[in-house]
């Protein structure tokens, strides 16, 4: 049983002013796995005051001082990798193999990227007699979701610290353990007092207190569209910068090439990674209509091959994060059946052999793009297959969505795939499995307005100043 009952404020672990505690449940066992303290507005105020006081000196540190700090953080981060992975499995149900690889590796990648960007970043440029400077924006409120918990925290905290900002982190209640360990890492690395602060608690309390706080300069938020909209409204009165990283319903276009069945199988197993709880998941698989039968068979085979079970063991897929999430995903699966989508694999209820835990059957529908299951973000292991007549039709289907976070194009000819990728209205299009820590990541349309990762992510934490004459 874990008990995390203190907050990290002004370089110390302090008792909450608080509003009680909450038990957290392991989604694989439905048993209580620990307890965290819930903060109050007064805790946020204390953390913001500490961050404001620290900003005066931390914003003036040199590039070399901040590089030394980030390298010290890296050494502490690497020591705690196994504990971070265990915490992620326990809090949100990621399989151990995934938690100890991609989940924690993403944090290392964001740290290395923050170091590399800071090493080279041009903070000053001359344009004639005018000096254009980039300066840290100030005190940043960082609000994160539970689905890739360490990724979401590190993609904000590391560039913010690299840029010279001070921060107050509000992690998700459902993934409080890995955030606690990260705070311990930053403490052990010697982050100066007040530069990093963390307050746990309810979004409606801690998140709102940050969004409305007059002394917070910027909110960086990753999470749902509805909360992103609320934060934008809450932050408007104090004219903060608000960077939003929201949901998606990303298209995955497969060209009409050899190897279609293998690509369908890979896209289907890819959808089930992290129990489908990935904002950029390729959840609409757009395949040649003429080859739909072949594609459905391949998707069914791949979905049925995914082993679902104890995430601390060898299963490829664990549970979804909570009872609420389980109920939401079940409701979408039932909705798909009701609205006449063809069930290709999976379906409602627990997977065979499991009688507790928030486990979902890897599910595939074949349908059209107008159905609810093709339009709304399900955030579970549910793939929707849609047929296209020609590539113009595939692009039209891809773009017929309220979202624009990511897209995927796979096929034999890289250039042809890139041509299709150019036509998709979304922030990051992955071609034949491309991956790059320096590529900006963020949404068009209702997927948000921010850009994280690499130099673009770093730049979000900077203000522009001109000294003229
Ligand atoms: P959520 O919006 O419910 O919660 C996200 C965070 O906001 C949590 O820390 C929560 O406590 C806090 N919060 C809740 N109400 C708040 C309020 N009124 N004011 C301020 N903060 C508040 O989202 P979630 O369920 O944790 O995460 C799933 C969502 O996140 C999905 O929509 C997913 O697509 C999205 N997501 C987006 C990205 C991206 O990079 N674009 C990455 C991961 C997840």
Image: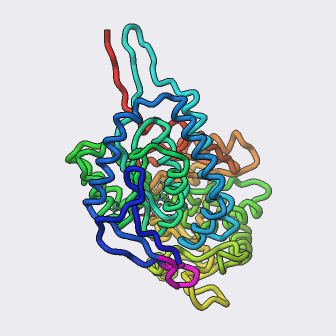
In terms of depth relative to the viewer, which is nearer, 225 or 444? 225
User: Residue extending furthest right?
Assistant: 258
In terms of depth relative to the viewer, which is nearer, 69 or 288? 69
* Residue 33 belongs to the span the image colors magenta: yes
Residue at image position (60%, 79%) is 343
Residue at image position (49%, 62%) is 180
Task: Label the magenta part by its dominant secondary structure.
Answer: loop
Residue at image position (51%, 45%) is 190
For the question of whether residue 95 can be seen, the reply is: yes
User: Residue extending furthest left?
Assistant: 237
Q: Quadrant of the C terminus?
A: top left
Q: Quadrant of ligand 1?
A: bottom left
| Image quarter of residue 72 | top right
Instruction: Tell whether 170 sits left or right of 342.
Output: left
Position above or below: 417 against 464? below
In terms of depth relative to the viewer, which is nearer, 91 or 250? 91
Q: Position of residue 149 (x, y in %)?
A: 52, 61
Q: Which residues are magenta?
A: 25-34
The mark tally for this picture is 0
Q: Position of residue 311 (x, y in %)?
A: 65, 75
Q: Position of residue 433 (x, y in %)?
A: 69, 51
Position above or below: 156 against 30? above
Q: Position of residue 143 (x, y in %)?
A: 40, 56
């Amino acid at each position: 049983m874990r008990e995390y009952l203190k907050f990290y404020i002004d370089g110390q672990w302090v008792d909450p002013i608080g509003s009680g505690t909450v038990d957290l449940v392991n989604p694989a066992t439905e048993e209580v796995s620990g307890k965290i303290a819930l903060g109050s507005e007064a805790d946020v105020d204390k953390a913001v005051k500490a961050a404001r006081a620290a900003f005066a000196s931390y914003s003036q540190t040199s590039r070399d001082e901040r590089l030394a700090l980030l390298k010290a953080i890296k050494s502490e981060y690497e020591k705690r990798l196994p504990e971070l992975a265990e915490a992620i499995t326990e809090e949100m149900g990621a399989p151990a193999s995934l938690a100890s690889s991609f989940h924690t590796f993403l944090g290392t990648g964001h740290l290395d990227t923050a170091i590399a960007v800071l090493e080279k970043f041009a903070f000053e440029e001359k344009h004639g007699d005018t000096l254009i400077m980039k300066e840290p924006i100030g005190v940043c409120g960082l609000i994160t979701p539970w689905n890739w918990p360490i990724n979401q925290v590190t993609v904000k905290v590391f560039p913010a610290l690299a840029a010279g900002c001070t921060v107050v982190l509000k992690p998700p209640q459902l993934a409080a353990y890995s955030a606690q360990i990260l705070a311990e890492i930053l403490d052990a690395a010697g982050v100066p007092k007040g530069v990093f602060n963390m307050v746990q608690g309810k979004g409606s309390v801690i998140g709102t207190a940050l969004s409305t706080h007059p002394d917070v300069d910027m909110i960086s938020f990753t999470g749902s569209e509805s909360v992103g909209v609320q934060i934008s409204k809450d932050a408007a009165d104090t004219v903060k910068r608000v960077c939003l990283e929201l949901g998606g319903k990303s298209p995955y276009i497969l060209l009409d090439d050899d190897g279609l069945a293998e690509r369908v199988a890979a896209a289907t197993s890819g959808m089930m990674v992290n129990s489908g709880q990935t904002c950029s998941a390729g959840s609409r698989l757009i395949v040649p209509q003429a080859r739909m039968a072949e594609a459905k068979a391949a998707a069914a085979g791949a979905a049925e091959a995914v082993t679902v079970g104890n995430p601390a063991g060898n299963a490829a897929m664990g549970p979804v994060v909570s009872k609420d999430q389980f109920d939401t995903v079940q409701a979408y699966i039932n909705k798909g059946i009701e609205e006449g989508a063809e069930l290709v694999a999976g379906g409602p209820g627990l997977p065979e052999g499991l009688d507790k835990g928030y486990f979902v059957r890897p599910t595939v529908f074949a349908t059209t793009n107008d159905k609810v299951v093709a339009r709304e973000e399900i955030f579970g292991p549910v793939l929707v297959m849609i047929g296209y007549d020609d590539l113009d039709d595939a692009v039209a289907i891809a773009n017929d969505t309220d979202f624009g976070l990511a897209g995927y194009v796979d096929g034999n000819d890289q250039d042809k795939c890139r041509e299709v990728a150019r036509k998709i209205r979304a922030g990051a299009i992955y071609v034949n499995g491309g991956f790059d820590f320096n590529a900006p990541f963020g949404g068009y349309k209702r997927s948000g307005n921010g850009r994280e990762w690499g130099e673009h992510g770093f730049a979000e934490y900077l203000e522009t100043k001109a000294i003229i004459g």
